[in-house]
Amino acid sequence: MSHVETLQLFAAAFVSKPFRERFVHEALKKPGKLHERVCHRIEEIFAPQYKNGTVQFNPEEPCLLLGVRQSPQETTWNQVQGQVGLGAGLLVIALSATKFYAETEGPGAEVWAGER
């Protein structure tokens, strides 16, 4: 599955309906803008049910990482774990598009996560 397909399936499953098309566009064309939303306005992206959510990734599970001003980058959960909790804000999407983990920016960052 391509990164575009992963983002589209993910958006259909997890992203709030009014923001789905915009999510894919920003992830591919304006990653800095999407990162800023994750950091400061995450409630525009996800429904409240995902706030304080939990999710389990296998260490070698392939993921897309959307972090500080970068296009989606393929990696593994094991490689992402070093960035979790640093306060920079991030969004990790399983390549299967079946789960995600997101953090807002700064101390006291909020965690948003979900699985289907």
Image (spheres, rainbow, N blue to C red):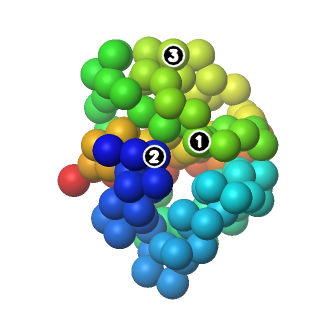
**105 or 36, nearer to the observer:** 36
Alpha carbon separation for disc pair 1 and 3: 14 Å
Looking at the rendered structure, the secondary structure element under dot 1 is loop
What's the distance in space between the residues labelled 1 and 2, CA to CA?
8 Å
Q: Is residue 26 above or below residue 74?
A: below
The mark nearer the N terminus, 2 or 3, is 2
Q: Residue at x 44, y 15 (%)?
A: 78
Looking at the image, do the residues carrying marks 1 and 3 touch, with CB atoms under 8 Å apart?
no
To which quarter of the image does residue 94 belong? top left
Distance from the alpha carbon under mark 2 to that under mark 3: 18 Å
Type of amino acid under label 1: Pro
Q: Is residue 44 left or right of 54 when viewed as pictured?
A: right
Q: Are marks 1 and 2 in contact (CB under 8 Å)?
A: yes
- The tag on residue 41 is none
Residue 15 visible in the snapshot: yes
Residue type at the position of mark 3: Gln
Q: For the residue carrying disc 2, how many other residues have a C-alpha within 10 Å: few (<14), some (14-19), or many (20+)?
A: some
Q: Looking at the image, which residue sits at the far bottom? A: 18
**Element under label 3?**
helix
Looking at the image, residue 60 lies above or below residue 18: above
Residue under label 2: 3
Amino acid at pointer 2: His
Mark 3 Cα shell of 10 Å, populated few (<14), some (14-19), many (≥20): some
User: What residue is rendered at 57% in x and 34% in y?
Assistant: 73
Residue that carries the numbered disc 1 in the rendered image: 72
The structure residue drawn at horizontal position 43% and vertical position 22%, both measured from the top left corner, is 76
N-term mark: 1 or 2: 2
Q: Residues within 10 Å of mark 1 (few under 14, many from 20)?
A: many
Q: Quadrant of the N terminus?
A: top left
Task: Say which residue label 3 marks.
Answer: 79
